[in-house]
């Protein structure tokens, strides 16, 4: 069996919200459950913990960089699926850059996917865009774009 190198997946979205509000929305469970497939995510300086709707652990990984409200880098393991949970952990980087007009550019990079081909396929394209579209809509309107998968 040969392993192909998986390229980094990079997603960018402009959000009309402050860096602080975006940071809060990606690190607090009361926010994440409204746009991230119902997952309640808590991020502290050293841990990234994602719990599913029934308190099952989706992910419990290290945080490598914690620079509120600008940059967050953490491990990723797709614990919501048995096959993907057995893959090597990958990495997710969130970068928030504010512009003078009150709009922020959020860049999400998912990399180190070489040992996680099923995860790479699952989160590519629609996977991350589902989450980021829901985040943008929630922050700009207060409404949920999608009903959480529960």
Image: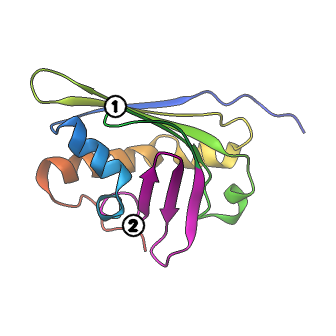
In the displayed structure, would residue 147 be above or below residue 104?
Answer: below
Residue placed furthest toward the left: 101
Residue 134 place in picture, x, y as percent: 29, 52
Disc nearer the start of the sequence (1/2): 2
Check disc 1: other Cα within 10 Å, few if <14, some if 14-19, many if 20+: some
Residues under labels 1 and 2: Cα distance? 24 Å
Name which quarter of the figure residue 5 lies in: top right
Q: Nearer the viewer, residue 123 or 112?
A: 112
Q: At 76% across and 30% down in the image, what residue appears?
A: 4
Report whether 86 appears left or right of 139: right
> Residue under circle 1?
70
**Which numbered disc covers residue 4?**
none
Magenta stretch containing residue 37, yes or no? yes
Residue 139 place in picture, x, y as percent: 19, 49
Quarter holding the C terminus is: bottom left
Report whether 80 appears left or right of 28: right
Q: Secondary structure at mark 2?
A: loop
Name which quarter of the figure residue 79 lies in: bottom right
Please provide the residue range marked out in magenta.
Answer: 34-61
Report whether 78 appears left or right of 66: right
Name which quarter of the figure residue 100 lies in: top left
Residue 96 place in picture, x, y as percent: 32, 31
Which is more foreground, mark 1 or mark 2?
1
Residue 38 place in picture, x, y as percent: 39, 66
Q: At 44% across and 74% down in the image, what residue appears?
A: 53
Q: Secondary structure at mark 1?
A: loop
Check disc 2: other Cα within 10 Å, few if <14, some if 14-19, many if 20+: many
Report whether 43 appears left or right of 120: left
> Residue under circle 2?
38
């Amino acid at each position: 069996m040969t392993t192909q190198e998986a390229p980094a997946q990079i997603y960018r979205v402009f959000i009309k919200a402050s860096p602080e509000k975006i940071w809060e929305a990606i690190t607090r469970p009361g926010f994440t459950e409204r746009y991230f497939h119902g997952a309640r995510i808590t991020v502290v300086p050293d841990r990234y913990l994602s719990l599913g709707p029934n308190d099952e652990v989706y992910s419990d990984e290290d945080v490598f960089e914690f620079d509120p409200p600008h940059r967050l880098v953490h491990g990723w393991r797709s614990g919501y699926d048995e096959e993907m949970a057995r893959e090597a952990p990958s990495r997710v980087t969130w970068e928030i850059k504010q512009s003078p007009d009150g709009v922020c550019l959020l860049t999400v990079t998912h990399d180190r996917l070489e040992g996680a081909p099923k995860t790479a396929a699952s989160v590519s394209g629609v996977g991350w865009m589902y989450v980021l579209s829901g985040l943008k809509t929630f922050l700009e309107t207060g409404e949920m774009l999608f009903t959480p998968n529960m």
